[in-house]
Image (tube, rainbow, N blue to C red):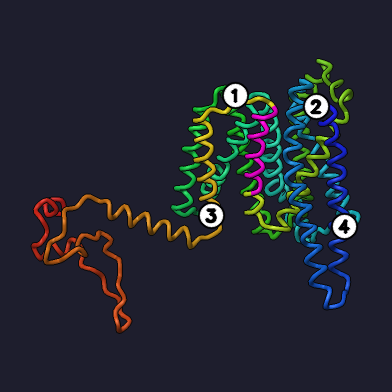
Amino acid sequence: LNLGMSSFGLLSVLLVGGTCILMAFHRKADGATEPAASTSVSASLRKAVYTAFVLVAFMVVGPGLVLLNKHIMNMHNFRYPLVLSSGGVIASMLVSHAAVWSGFAHVSAESVAAVKGAQWFRVALPIGAARAATLAMGNAVYLYLGLGFIQMLKALAPSIVLAVMCALGVRRPTRAAVWFVFMIVAGTMLEVKGELEASLIGLALMMFSEFCEAVALVLTQRLLQDRKFSVMESMYIVSPPIVVCLSLAAFGMEVPRMVKSGDWRIVVDNSADFAGAAGLGLAVNWVTMMLIQATSSLFTKILNTVRCICLVGLGVAVYGEVVSPLEIAGYVIALSGFAGYNYVQMFPDAASTIEHNVDKCICKNISSPPPSPRLGAGAADCCEDEAMPLRDGERSRRPSMSESLEEGDAPPKVAEILG
């Protein structure tokens, strides 16, 4: 197992190197002029190979980083999540800045000016602090909860993101989105109830990590959309404050304790594992950026959910974790709510249709007596605004229940309710 985990260091280097080579080839091929007959075929082939590589890398590096961090903390007894989280973000900062300095990537003057001076503290620092807390707490939770249960709890993320968006006034959610979020929350509550080895400290760390991640996502969305930052510009500008926040917290809370206890020798004795964790942390950020560019953010979220499901099965198969039937039922409900939430986010018209159908069902389920024989079945319809097209293009509505009462045709029980 130790040899397998150490090999992730080499794997991360190969993935990042292959990523850079493919991106350089992709750029060079796009700028080259080819005969018109072969352009479409070769471009489609390059895009297919590029996308396939990114998909495979995304499915490998994320679980690889999770398993390697869990291995380092549990098998090596390395109880310093802040120090462990610092390796990946330091590598991301160095590579993103090296890419800009070497001309491989570009950061516009407008983007640099947007975070210059005091703007750095208002724009970049809050995102860096939120992401630093997300990484630190996300690693610490593996000391208290099982691998599969943590992946199940990640299905709660959309509900927390939605709450943060409403609190910050970013967007007002549709009613359909709120309904699916309640479904996610209900499923997560069943997961927690069904977990046989739930830890209060672990649950608190997980909730705080997801809250900080939601804050970072909402603030990053503002950065990418409102200020028109590219993904590379966002990584270039945000990675330094993440390193600053993690380093300050690590040197204040973990490094003195690590030096005093002599646990720094764990890093020296298992340097391959720590190098692999840093390399995989870099690869996760880099490959996620590539996947969003090659597909979409929605596809990335869906694929990440598939990845979490695979990790749940891996926790049962490799680590012998026990998943109760109630926990599985809760996870299925949460995933169904997650799927519905993403569906209404992707198709706003579908959200309106769902809301209309639910309103119609609620309206029809209101207890009311049978309609008057003279008015017919149309009088029982409580949706008074439903309209019917006429031949001349005008619209007319069916008589409402209150209008039926004026004619004296409603039964006494309804007249008492409305009178």
Q: Which residue is mark 2?
A: 1
Residue 15 lies, in percent from the top left, at 84, 46
Q: What secondary structure is marked by label 1?
A: helix
For the residue pair 2 and 88, the one nearer the viewer reads as 2
Q: Which residue is mark 3?
A: 343
In terms of sequence position, does the residue under pointer 2 or pointer 3 come before the other? 2
Which residue range is magenta in the image?
A: 303-318
- Marks 3 and 1: CB-CB under 8 Å? no
- Identify whether 102 is placed above or below 203: below
Instruction: Estimate the spatial distance between the alpha carbons at disc 3 and disc 4, rounded to whole Å.
Output: 36 Å
Residue 136 lies, in percent from the top left, at 70, 32
Name the mark on residue 43.
none
Which residue in the rendered view is the most extreme toward the front?
317
Q: Which residue is mark 1?
A: 201
For the residue marked with disc 1, what is the amino acid? Answer: Ile
Q: What secondary structure is marked by label 3?
A: helix
